[in-house]
Structure formats: C-alpha cells, structure tokens
Image: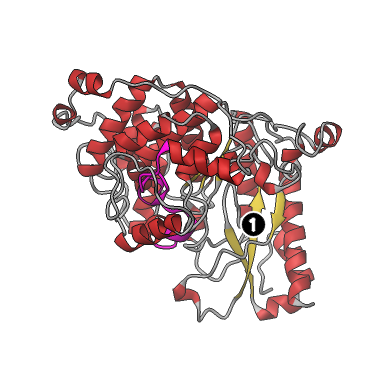
C-alpha cells in the first residue's frame, strides 16, 4: 500500500470508529443534511452549515511533530476531526465525550505542542445579534491577558503569535484604530457603500463611573480565596508582550492605510489602555466595525476571531467555510482528555453568554478590574474569573492540565473538593503510539511504523479486537 492509501484507510477507519460510537449518543444538533438541502441557497437559509451536519475526518497540515521527535523512526499521519454544529446542552456534551472516549479506546494517541483546540461560538442557525457581538468583543478584548493564563506558552507567545495572536496586544484596536476609521475601511472595501447602522453608539459617562468606584481603590481589594486550588494567584503566567510583534502588526496596518484617527492614548510602542479599547469597541455601530477592530493585519485570525462578521458577512457566497456565523476561540492546546475538551467548550460558551447579558456599567467595571489584574496578577487571575462565572470544575480541569504539564502532584484535598481524579491514563501512555486528532474539539496525530504500513489490514483487525500489535 502507498502512503496515500494508508492515510486514506486511517481516515476511513477513524470515521467508522466515530459513527459506531454515535449510535444512541446523538446530541442536540443545530441542523441535518436534509434540512440544509431543503433550506439552502447562496446567501440565505442554512447553506452556511453545509459542512457541519456530521463529524468530518480530514488532514491537518498545520500540525507538526515536536522538535524532540525528529529522530523518531515512526511515521506520523496528521488528522483533523470537526464536529457537527451542536447546541450547548448536556446531550451534546455527551456526544462529544462519547466520541473522544471511543477514539481513545480504538486508537493510540499523541498530541503534539502544535495541536490546537478551536471552538466556534454561535447562535444556532442565526447571526449573533449586533449588541451581543459588540459586548462579547469588548469583554474578550479586556479579558484576553487574564484568560491567556489558561493556555500553554506555545499557544500564547510562540507559534501563538502566528496562529492565535493576542487581541489585547496585537489587533487593530490594540494599535489604537478608532471605531470611525474601522467604519471607513469597511466602507472602502465595499466600493464606498456604507456598512450600515445595526445599533446606536454607546454613550457612557466614564468620569462619573470612575468617581463612583475609583480603580486605585479597587486595586486594594485583594480577595481571599475560599476554595482550594493547585496554583496560587500569579503562578499561572499570561502573555509576554513582544515589542517586535507589536511593531510588525502596526507596520501591517500602515502598509494598507494611514492611521488617520487613533484612539486616545494610542502609541507606536505600547498597546492602548484596556478601558479606552473597550470604549472604542462600544462606539462601533455595526458587526463589521467590531470585526475590523479585532482584526490582525499581519497574521489574520486572532486568539478571538471575529472575521466571520467582516464587512461582507451577510452578502458573501454561502457554500463557503467563511460564512459560519460564529466567533472562534483559537488558543486552547489540543488534548484528548474529554474533561479538558469540554471544560474549554463550556468556558467559551459561558464567557460569550455572560458578556451578552452584561450591562454597560458592568462591562466597564470588568474593564477596570482586568486592567488591575493585568498589572497585578497576584490580585485576581483566571481561576478567580472562572469561579466567579460558576465554572469551578472547569477551573480545576484547567489547573489539572497545567499541573500534569509541569509534573506537579495535585494534593488529595483538592481532588476530593472537586470530586474528580487527578490523572488521565491515556496521556501517560508511552511514546510510539498512533494518534487521533480533533479540530473544533481536539487535534492530534496518527502514526504507523514502516513495518505496520505493510501489514495495515491485519493490524486494523487486531487493534479492533484489542489484540497486541506484535502477535
């Protein structure tokens, strides 16, 4: 068999594994293939969900082996798995958990550092309402430095500068692009046609709010934790600001148009302040303006990707990947631990839902708190954020991943408090194993030895029945 035949056979077998696992475990899917065909159309209906009615297995050429694996004699095959569009319900979570467990039981798995977990947040078949999108955009911009503490160094500050760069530090709004300029750019991309008004500009009395709760007093309100954690405040690192990346992303903007109108406090060497950035986002009057402020001209999709709400989001061709009506969360590390996968899913959904319900006063308070937390991580960190949002178990799973990555033994009292086990067996498996990779919920790698390639039909049968490979 050729390498191409082997790769195709692997993807077919992975698809079979998934389909067998789904029997009796179908979650609350947003739509079906039949509904998409019946209600399709180039720019309307359900055609934007054309490729998201079932689990899809394909290649992922962006995932690479780690540097310390270059001498590995085992041949790897990259695999990307995309879930169908699912509503965020326990039934849907059960579908995802069931599939991941089936892949673990059927395949030997390795998740390299380059593997990522991409989560798309949307509103079923509809667009996210403008006022909600604007609040989510403001909320994620100011929370970005603290939320980055959930993720690995690689996905924050290394390859993350290419694949998931910080919205807070390297996006257009970070460089001080104003809402007014964002509107003019969107208009120029539509041959002078205005993007339209989807909501009123938020009029916010910043001075009055600052007098009510001065930020310098809030800095002294160092909360005491009433719950056990693995890491103390300040021990989970966030971004390391990269001067060169800031310069590169600013040059990318200036290469397309001058910064005619920059927000107050904008600088060529440091990002705009969090409160000022929030105000500019809240002054946007359409989804394309919000999307433009979050765009990264140098690298494209940012850690929180709003590109799918760009200047032509309601008019572009429909049967095309760019028509998904979602915000994409791009920074989580790939993992095959179903608890960690679903923790990131629930965190993403909760963050967006919580932001949508916030009042503008609450949103600005959040901006002030995040400014304090950015400067003083020992005052308030991502674990505090998750507990405040009712995500205690999810916070534990984030800590468990970092503890395992750093070789830290989780105290028994912490395990008992959350009622979960500290260890996850498949991740402790020795190297030299095949992989299953998931995108949108988890990514990994399949690998076969050269000898296995010659005997793959028999090998597949042996593994299917749980027999040793070398018998």
Q: Is residue 35 above or below residue 144?
A: above
- Please tell me which residue lies in front, 413 or 273: 273
Name the residue located 59 percent from the left edge and 63 percent from the top edge. Answer: 445
Q: Quadrant of residue 463?
A: bottom right
Q: Position of residue 364 (x, y in %)?
A: 32, 26
What residue does disc 1 label?
80
Name the residue located 49 percent from the left edge and 37 percent from the top edge. Answer: 290
- Please tell me which residue lies in front, 131 or 85: 131
- Please tell me which residue lies in front, 334 or 98: 334
Q: Position of residue 397 (x, y in %)?
A: 42, 42
Q: Quadrant of residue 434?
A: bottom right
Would you say residue 171 sits in the magenta stretch? yes
- Magenta residues, as a range? 158-179
Q: Position of residue 155 (x, y in %)?
A: 43, 56
Would you say residue 255 sits in the magenta stretch? no
Q: How many marks?
A: 1
Quadrant where the N terminus is found in the figure: bottom right
Q: Is residue 254 above or below residue 223?
A: below
- Is 95 situated left or right of 291 in this image? right
- Is 459 situated left or right of 410 in this image? right
Name the residue located 50 percent from the left edge and 62 percent from the top edge. Answer: 114
Q: Is residue 160 visible?
A: no
- Please tell me which residue lies in front, 447 or 263: 263
Q: Is residue 98 above or below residue 196?
A: below
Mark 1 neighbour density, 10 Å: few (under 14) some (14–19) many (20 or more): many
């Amino acid at each position: 068999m050729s390498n191409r035949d082997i790769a195709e056979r692997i993807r077919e077998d992975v698809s079979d594994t998934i389909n067998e696992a789904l029997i009796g475990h179908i979650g609350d899917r947003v739509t079906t293939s039949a509904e998409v065909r019946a209600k399709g159309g180039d720019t309307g209906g359900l055609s934007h969900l054309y490729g998201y009615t079932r689990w899809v297995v394909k290649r992922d050429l962006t995932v690479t082996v780690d540097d310390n694996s270059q001498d590995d004699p085992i041949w790897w095959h990259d695999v990307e798995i995309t879930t169908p569009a699912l509503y965020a319900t326990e039934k849907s979570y059960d579908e995802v958990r069931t599939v991941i467990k089936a892949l673990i039981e059927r395949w030997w798995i390795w998740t390299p550092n380059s593997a990522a977990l991409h989560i798309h947040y949307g509103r079923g078949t509809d667009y996210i309402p403008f006022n909600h999108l604007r609040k989510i955009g403001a909320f994620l911009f100011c929370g970005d430095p603290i939320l980055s503490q959930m993720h690995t160094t690689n996905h924050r500050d290394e390859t993350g500068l290419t694949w998931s760069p910080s919205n807070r530090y390297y996006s257009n709004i970070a460089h001080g692009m104003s809402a007014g300029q964002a509107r003019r750019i969107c208009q120029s991309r539509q041959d002078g046609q205005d993007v339209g008004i989807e909501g009123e500009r938020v009029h916010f009395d910043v001075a009055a709010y600052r007098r009510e709760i001065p930020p310098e007093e809030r800095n002294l309100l160092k909360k005491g934790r009433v719950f056990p954690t693995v890491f103390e405040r300040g021990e989970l690192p966030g971004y390391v600001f990269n001067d060169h990346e800031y310069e590169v992303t600013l040059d990318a903007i200036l290469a397309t148009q001058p910064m005619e109108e920059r927000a107050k406090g904008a600088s060529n060497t440091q990002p705009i302040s969090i409160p000022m950035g929030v105000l500019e986002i809240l002054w946007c009057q359409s989804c394309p303006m919000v999307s433009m402020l979050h765009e990264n001209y140098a690298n494209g999709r940012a850690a929180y990707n709003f590109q799918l709400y760009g200047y032509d989001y309601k008019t572009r061709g429909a049967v095309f990947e760019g028509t998904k009506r979602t915000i994409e969360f791009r920074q989580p590390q790939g993992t095959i631990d179903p608890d960690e996968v679903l923790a990131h899913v629930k965190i993403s959904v909760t963050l967006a839902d919580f932001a949508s319900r916030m009042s503008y006063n609450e949103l600005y308070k959040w901006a002030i708190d995040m400014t304090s937390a950015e400067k003083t991580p020992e005052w308030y960190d991502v674990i505090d954020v998750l507990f405040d949002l009712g995500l205690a178990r999810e916070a534990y799973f984030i800590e468990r991943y970092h503890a395992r990555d750093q070789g830290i033994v989780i105290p028994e009292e912490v395990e008992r408090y959350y009622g979960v086990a500290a260890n996850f067996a498949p991740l402790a498996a020795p190297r030299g194993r095949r992989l299953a990779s998931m995108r949108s919920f988890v990514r990994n790698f399949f690998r076969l030895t050269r000898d296995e390639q010659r005997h793959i039909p028999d090998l597949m049968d042996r593994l299917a029945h749980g027999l040793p490979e070398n018998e």
